[in-house]
Image (tube, rainbow, N blue to C red):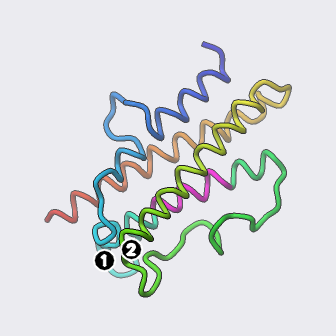
Amino acid sequence: MDSPKLVLALLEEAYEKKTWHGPNLKQSIKGISAKQAAWRPGPGRHNIWEEMLHAAYWKYAVRRRIEGGKRGSFALKGSNFFTRPEPGNLNDAAWSADKKLLEREHRALHGMASKVLRTARAAKLLPQLYGVAFHDIYHAGQIRLLRRLMER
């Protein structure tokens, strides 16, 4: 398999394709309610909702860097980590909207990657793109750990 195809496969496996190693990012949030997504293991610690949006943000950030897009154009104000739930917004509709944002950012990144990996820039961009896949798996593991801690 050539490098571009491998990177696209890694992006898909890390986000939503069946894996041998356990849940990917999308599977890690499956079946989680807004209340569960907002649970914190301790004061000042990130919750599942924030970890998920952090992954969405970095999909956007890498895509923006590669495309040369405008900084600050992410759907949410801010960068990196986003406090969730917002005050008065602990509901399944807000949680669902943010899950859809993750999905949109993944689709946009994958679509851009499938085009740019056919260009002369591909070799230079591979580390950023497979880095997104590794980032997804890392945060999927954190989310699974938070789910287990919540059960205690």
Q: Mark 2 — residue? A: 45
Task: Classify mark 2: helix, strand or loop.
Answer: loop
Tell me where residue 108 appears, x and y as whole percent: 66, 45
Residue at x 36% of width, y 75% of height: 91
Residue at x 35% of width, y 56% of height: 143
| Residue 113, placed above or below residue 152 | above
Q: Mark 1 — residue? A: 42
Q: Which of the pair 133/98 is nearer the observer?
A: 98
Tell me where residue 110 appears, x and y as whole percent: 63, 38
Task: Classify mark 1: helix, strand or loop.
Answer: loop
Assign the magenta stretch its main secondary structure: helix
Residue 31 located within the stretch drawn in magenta = no
| Residue 102, placed above or below residue 84 | above
Q: Which of the pair 103/84 is nearer the observer?
A: 103
Residue at x 13% of width, y 65% of height: 152
* Callout 1 crowding tier (Cα within 10 Å): few <14, some 14–19, many ≥20: few
The residue type indicated by label 1 comes to Gly
Find out whether the residues at labels 1 and 2 contact each other: C-beta distance under 8 Å.
yes
Tell me where residue 52 appears, x and y as whole percent: 46, 59
Magenta residue span? 51-60
Tell me where residue 84 appears, x and y as whole percent: 45, 75
Q: Quick one: quadrant of the N terminus?
A: top right
Residue sticking out furthest to the front: 93
